[in-house]
Image (cartoon, rainbow, N blue to C red):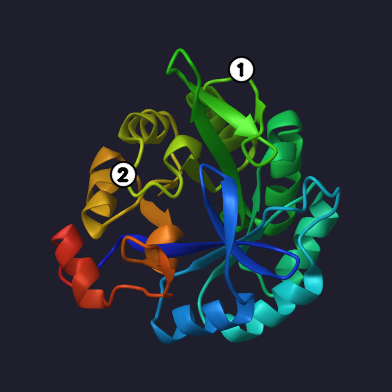
Amino acid sequence: MLSVRVIPLLLFRRDGLYKGIGFRDHKYVGDVLNAVRIFAQKQAHEVILLDIAATAEGRSIALDLVSRVAQECMMPLTVGGGITDVATAQALLNAGAEKVTVNSHALAHPDVIGEIAALSGSQSVIAAIDVGRGDNRCPESLTHCGSRWTGRHPVEVAGELVAAGAGEILLTAVDRDGTGQGFDLEVIAGVAEAVSVPVIACGGAGKLSHFRDAVAAGAAAVAAGSLFVFHGRRRAVLISYPDGEEIGTAFGEEVG
């Protein structure tokens, strides 16, 4: 029975879905609802939907959009973007999301993770940690869509947020985002060893074998954007998702 979750991660702002490289140079790739319908038809395990403009604009992901996406989703839906308090998180869960993910605000105020977990359960809150490597090549946690360096190692941050009540960690390698060069296995291994909750590896997937590498390093699930929305060297937009047999073969597991 296949046990690894393979998750499309969709980024959007205002008028549609976008995908970039290294959290920059975002290219419009289509309509949010249409993409979710396609992933539902292809029986994706879960979907993560992140509003990449929310934090900068001082707001949270829109409730009406989450409600419309949830109606189309037919699979577990995680949403994030600009969540700063438990009331907003609860409203998003009531709108149809199964989980919320908190990034920038959680690093400054980890208590918000505990407040959400206390009200809705740890399984409903994911702590998102974006990781970059500076000139010294040491991993460092970033906030505000990868634009602010915190000076903190992701292992330290992960431990703090799990202690606060996070039920999962979404770990994204900013330097590898959209490159297709593979995950940052060192960071995945370090965080996975340090925490007792599932780690979702993201950033760098270019082929299915990269998923296997991430799981071997300690990830419990894998997420990708470019791999599922671009096709070929010219990066033509084509939303896709591997079938169960392809995923099972990639992980060397029997598909049930």
Residue at screen point 58% across, 49% down: 25
Residue at screen point 37% across, 28% down: 190
Badge 1: residue crowd in 10 Å (few <14, some 14–19, many ≥20): few
Gap between marks 1 and 2 measured at Cα: 25 Å
For label 2, the residue is 181
Q: Is residue 204 above or below residue 195?
A: below
Residue at screen point 57% across, 28% down: 141
Q: Position of residue 71 (x, y in %)?
A: 64, 85
Query: Which quadrant holds the N terminus?
Result: bottom left
Give amino acid for label 1: Gly
Quarter of the figure with residue 147: top right
**Residue 24 falls left or right of residue 210:** right
Badge 2: residue crowd in 10 Å (few <14, some 14–19, many ≥20): some
Q: Position of residue 105 (x, y in %)?
A: 75, 38
Comparing labels 1 and 2, the label whose residue is closer to the camera? 2
Tags 1 and 2 in contact by the CB under 8 Å rule? no
Q: Secondary structure at mark 1?
A: loop
Query: Which quadrant holds the C terminus?
Result: bottom left
Quarter of the figure with residue 12: bottom right
Q: Is residue 254 above or below residue 36?
A: above
Q: Position of residue 125 (x, y in %)?
A: 62, 52
For label 1, the residue is 151
Q: Secondary structure at mark 2?
A: loop
Q: Position of residue 167 (x, y in %)?
A: 55, 48
Q: In this view of the protein, can residue 123 be seen by the observer?
A: yes
Give amino acid for label 2: Gln
> Residue 173 got which mark?
none
**Residue 144 falls left or right of residue 128:** right
49 or 99, which is in the foreground? 49
133 or 64, which is in the foreground? 133
